[in-house]
Image (cartoon, rainbow, N blue to C red):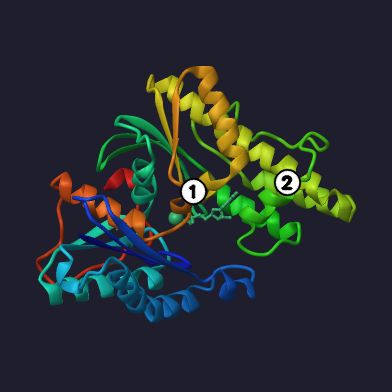
Amino acid sequence: MILGIETSCDETGIALYSAKTRELFHALHSQTEMHNEYGGVVPELASRDHIRRVLPLIRKVLEEAGKSLRDIDAIAYTRGPGLAGALLAGASIAHGLAYALGKPAIAIHHLEAHLLSSLLAEPAPSFPFIALLVSGGHTQLLRADAVGRYQMLGETVDDAAGEAFDKAAKLLGLDYPGGPALAELALRGNATRFKLPRPMTKSGDLNFSFSGLKTAVLTLVKRETEDSRADIAAAFQEAVVDVLVAKSMAALLDSGLKHLVIAGGVAANSRLRERLRSAARAESVQVYFAPKEFCTDNGAMIAFAGALHLNAGLKTDDSNLSFAARPRWELGQI
Ligand code: KG4
Ligand code: ZN
């Protein structure tokens, strides 16, 4: 039984995963309402709220599973990347519990957990595969050869895809986090009325850039009337999706791999899913998404990644009380 603790940003996620039975219990507290007032995440408030939420959520999950602390075999927690204070809240509780119970603590890379959460899908992908990680803080294409073996192929040179969604949504007057709200507004819009650029599709590499699209949205919002908002949202979403699809297909072609995995908050986007499915069909490749409830931040992906680390015989930290959060941490370095 692995306990998973996620506190890297504005969601406190706790889960209990049994590697043997694949049973999963999880609970989540989202701080979005608290941060909405400020139009974005306030790090200090985030850390303090994680401290308040972690233990009650652990109790809740144990109760639902009908288990006690003694049944836990290891404690997986997000070591990074993320907000330093928020990470420290989860890391210190994880290490405190691990020490008290005499069980190992497993430091998990947040993006690796997003990537591995796709293995919770039915059917699950098998290694090696190309992974497109699209979250609020990162946009990366990776080659995954095994648990713990990842090679970075390309990443954003400025804003992450989710960040671009959030910023464009803010310009359109939508609440934080704006990604899901913008996607919903786009459903009522015409994606072809406004022509937005497809940044870096001709760059010859697998990098991305999204900050220019945000500026294009700003120009349109200033120029057009209120009733054009849905069309602007649709044009923006289509541009981001076009780029993500084009680069993912290029990564598959370059590597010769036939499996593509999409993970991270933006993987919940319906238009992206639809477009990737049809591109994959046309290119005879398989595309896999993490289950929708595990696309955005959650504890289940941390517990699951912990179980896979144990299974793969990767190093755990059971020796002492010292630990460190890693707010900046490249996935290619683990
Ligand atoms: O992975 P995640 O929960 O947190 C990070 O690790 O960053 O991703 C959150 C991001 C936010 O930027 C949010 O707006 C975006 O994912 N997001 C979406 C959708 N759902 C969440 N973006 C577009 N469409 C969605 N349906
Ligand atoms: Zn995340």
Horizontal side of residue 233 vs 303, given as left or right: right
Crowding at mark 1 (Cα within 10 Å: few <14, some 14-19, many 20+): some
Q: Amino acid at mark 2?
A: Ala
Find numbered disc 2 in the image and state the secondary structure of the residue it sits on: helix
Res 52 quadrant in image:
bottom left
Residue at 22%, 60% in the rendered image:
2
Of the 4 image quadrants, the one containing the N terminus is bottom left
Q: How far is disc 1 from disc 2 in space, using C-alphas?
A: 19 Å
Q: Amino acid at mark 1?
A: Lys
Horizontal side of residue 161 vs 140, given as left or right: right
Horizontal side of residue 246 vs 220, given as left or right: left
Seen from the viewer's position, the closer of residues 287 and 313 is 287
Crowding at mark 2 (Cα within 10 Å: few <14, some 14-19, many 20+): many
- Residue 214 at what x, y percent from top left? 69, 49
Mark number displayed over residue 186: 2
Residue 216 shows in the view: no
Mark number displayed over residue 202: none
Quickly name the residue at label 1. 292
Seen from the viewer's position, the closer of residues 177 and 329 is 177
